[in-house]
Image (cartoon, coloured by chain):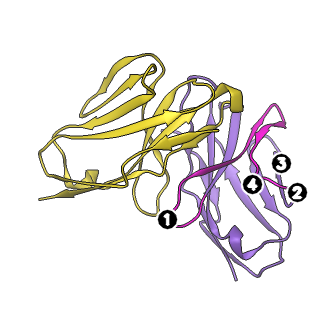
Chain colours: A purple, B yellow
Amino acid sequence: EPEVTQTPSHQVTQMGQEVILRCVPISNHLYFYWYRQILGQKVEFLVSFYNNEISEKSEIFDDQFSVERPDGSNFTLKIRSTKLEDSAMYFCASSYWNSNQPQHFGDGTRLSIL
Amino acid sequence: GQNIDQPTEMTATEGAIVQINCTYQTSGFNGLFWYQQHAGEAPTFLSYNVLDGLEEKGRFSSFLSRSKGYSYLLLKELQMKDSASYLCAVRDPNAGNMLTFGGGTRLMVKP
């Protein structure tokens, strides 16, 4: 069964450094998403991406965040200058369509900011 | 705003039936999803309801009442491996169709 894959599984970074989290969505899916989950808290939406542009973003997704689809398979989340409070599990998800289709999640990247 | 409420924790016995409730208040509604999440793992899709009524999928069923802003997930013949968090998520077309998640219900299945 096709799945969303994310790399790395764990990223440790010094505060202030830039990180790039990588995702390969399911190949025939058209919508891509990033969510985060701070330890012990709920899953929070960050951004959705369709047709090579952001379709929706939350208040969390401020100027330090950006997303890109650099080629036909990868979907990346960049955090420009990391802060301690960025420590969380970051999940990538994809869906074929954005109305009645479920979003399928990758295994996540655990980001630890020191 | 968006508000999704679920009980924080539930405990049930192996072989039994458990019902996990979810209530929501959102500005719009375009479907409710249930996900299972084992500790440290990704949410896994379980079920989707957009019309009122019951959707059955093996040991799992999900019910929706849009007029009441209410859903439940029913798990039958509980197994130890069903111990996990169960996340209720609502899609709101007035919020770009993003998913808004509840805090999750941690279910512990005991022998």
Q: Residue at x 57, y 23 (%)?
A: B30
Name the N-terminal-most of marks 3 and 2: 2
Please state the chain letter of the residue tagged with numbered disc 2 in the rendered image.
A
Residue A36 makes an appearance in the image: yes
Please state the chain letter of the residue tagged with numbered disc 4 in the rendered image.
A
Q: Amino acid at mark 2?
A: Asp
Give the Cα separation between the discs numbered 3 and 2. Answer: 14 Å
Residue behind mark 4: A60
Residue B46 position within the rendered picture, expressed as x and y whole percent measured from the top left: 40, 37
Q: Amino acid at mark 4?
A: Ile
Q: Are marks 3 and 1 in contact (CB under 8 Å)?
A: no
Front residue of A96 and A99: A99
Mark 4 or mark 3, whichever is nearer to me: 4
Crowd class of label 4 (few under 14; some 14 to 19; many from 20; radius 10 Å): few
Give the Cα separation between the discs numbered 3 and 1. Answer: 28 Å
Front residue of B92 and A111: B92
Element type where label 1 sits in the image: loop
Magenta-colored stretch includes residue A52: yes
Element type where label 3 sits in the image: strand
Residue behind mark 3: A68
Give the Cα separation between the discs numbered 4 and 3. Answer: 17 Å
